[in-house]
Image: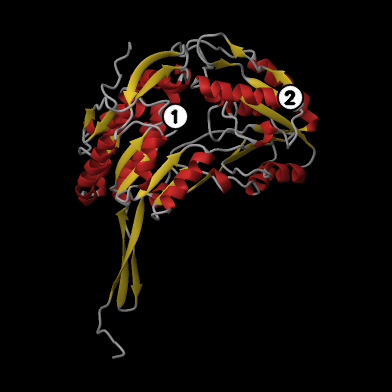
Amino acid sequence: MPYPTQPTASHFINGKYVEDTAGAEIPVIYPATGEQIAVVHEATPAIIELAITSARAAQKAWAAMSGTERGRILRRAADMIRERNHDLSVLETYDTGKPMSETLYVDATSGADALEYFGGLAGSLTGEHIQLGEDWVYTRREPLGLCVGIGAWNYPTQIACWKAAPALACGNAMVFKPSETTPLCALKVAEILHEAGLPAGLYNVIQGTGAVGAPLVTDPRVDKVSLTGSVPTGRKVYAAAAASIKHVTMELGGKSPLIIFDDASLEDAVGGAILANFYSSGQVCSNGTRVFVQKGIKEAFLKRLHERLQTVVMGDPLDEATNFGPMVSERQMNIVQGYIEKGQAEGARLVCGGKRVGTEGFYLEPTVFAEVTDTMTIAREEIFGPVMSVFDFDTEEEVITRANDTEFGLSAGVFTADLTRGHRVIAQMEAGSCFINSYNDAPVEAPFGGSKQSGVGRENSKAAINHYSQLKSVYVRMGAVDAPF
């Protein structure tokens, strides 16, 4: 494959690439052409054991280092990722099919942001002193131990870093399993971390399907599991982790509402809806795929949206002029096509799109449905593709009730010129990551995560520290101990 960042083996364990061809072959398919560009081998039990034992052996010494020392290595890795952003972006494009016009600016750079942020935070992770008269209590912030990270296929570099950075900053080790659909990028993250000075064994990457994830989640030597994935997968992983009372972070799916009031800037609202539905070809967990448009501007909104979608440049993802890429896999493309058929069968009006483009690769047109009702399948289930559902509404009270009528609670957005209303509406949204006059911003400084079925815990920001560490309380008595007998 003609790029310099191709990993040299299937796994990265104890500071080096490791191969075990006894594991089942996992083909790596380039979504733009449908061609196989690489192959990795699923982790065998021996590979899983090597990753866990390497991580456990390295973790204690890492935890004993000062936070400032740990942070220095993470910040060095962040610098290296930025220096190599172009090559890492090419790899991300081969892995996912996302166009270079996205990967150059969002994927590895977001991963670098996480490593820099948590690297800077590592030295500040302290406990507190609590005076109780003569006596006192002090607290120690301690690592959990060994964390398992399980990644999704839509942001492989970013997710590998979003999980690694807080875990390592707090003094943990990690075994990371990327999605079998996009297995390449996490290997380069591990390689760079090691090159930046991370001691061997602290960040291991192993490949595989759920058959590899399951023994990682249930292993008694694992202290925490962090998953990015679908709600059905989350339920299984959460239940398995709960059996041995492991710490968990679950960043799951959504069916998020985007509410557009009739006083909103039409151009901004259309732009927000495009970002909320068609960025990464719609393969973003936080997408605002239920777009509620106040009746007074609905037709103007649809007209302008249709006009702007005509400017989509679909083509070779390696061409930076391309701004819309393929679905990640044939399977995902088929799933989305099934939802498009259901939308039409259930009576939604197809405004534009709806078709596969070409026979090479897994391209689908950006698709917009109008006259969608709240009970339609496309209104209830997460599609994870470039399909927008547009709903009419009359009043603020009505749209708040309808927007919250979902099992999911990852994100929500509102566009309005009335900022008082914007804050009032967002305060009533049952969602964890929300936006006013914007959509899908995810700076590492802000907590990211959902409520209801969309997840448990938060990634990024200082909030993530609480999910990768634990507090120990120590009571210190200065006087005699008064016992009853």
Along the viewing direction, whichever of 54 and 125 lies nearer the viewer: 54
**Front of the two marks 2 and 1:** 2
Q: Is residue 106 left or right of residue 435?
A: left
Q: Indicate the secondary structure of the residue bearing disc 1.
A: loop
Occupied quadrant, residue 288: top right
Along the viewing direction, whichever of 442 and 452 lies nearer the viewer: 452
Say which residue appears at 21% left-offset and 33% top-offset: 15
- Label 2 or label 1, whichever comes before in sequence order: 1
Measuring from the top left, give residue 161's x and y in whole percent: 36, 35
Occupied quadrant, residue 480: bottom left
Residue 82 numbered mark, or none = none
- Whole-angstrom CA distance, mark 2 to mark 1, is 32 Å
Occupied quadrant, residue 426: top right
Measuring from the top left, give residue 211's x and y in whole percent: 39, 36
Crowding near the residue tagged with mark 2, few <14, some 14–19, many ≥20 C-alpha atoms within 10 Å: few
Instruction: Tell me: residue 461, above or below residue 353.
Output: below
Measuring from the top left, give residue 110's x and y in whole percent: 41, 31
Say which residue appears at 58% left-offset and 27% top-offset: 275
Along the viewing direction, whichever of 182 and 78 lies nearer the viewer: 182
Crowding near the residue tagged with mark 1, few <14, some 14–19, many ≥20 C-alpha atoms within 10 Å: many
- Quarter of the picture containing the C terminus is bottom left
Let me know if residue 386 appears in the view: no
Q: Which residue is mark 2?
A: 345
Say which residue appears at 24% left-offset and 26% top-offset: 19
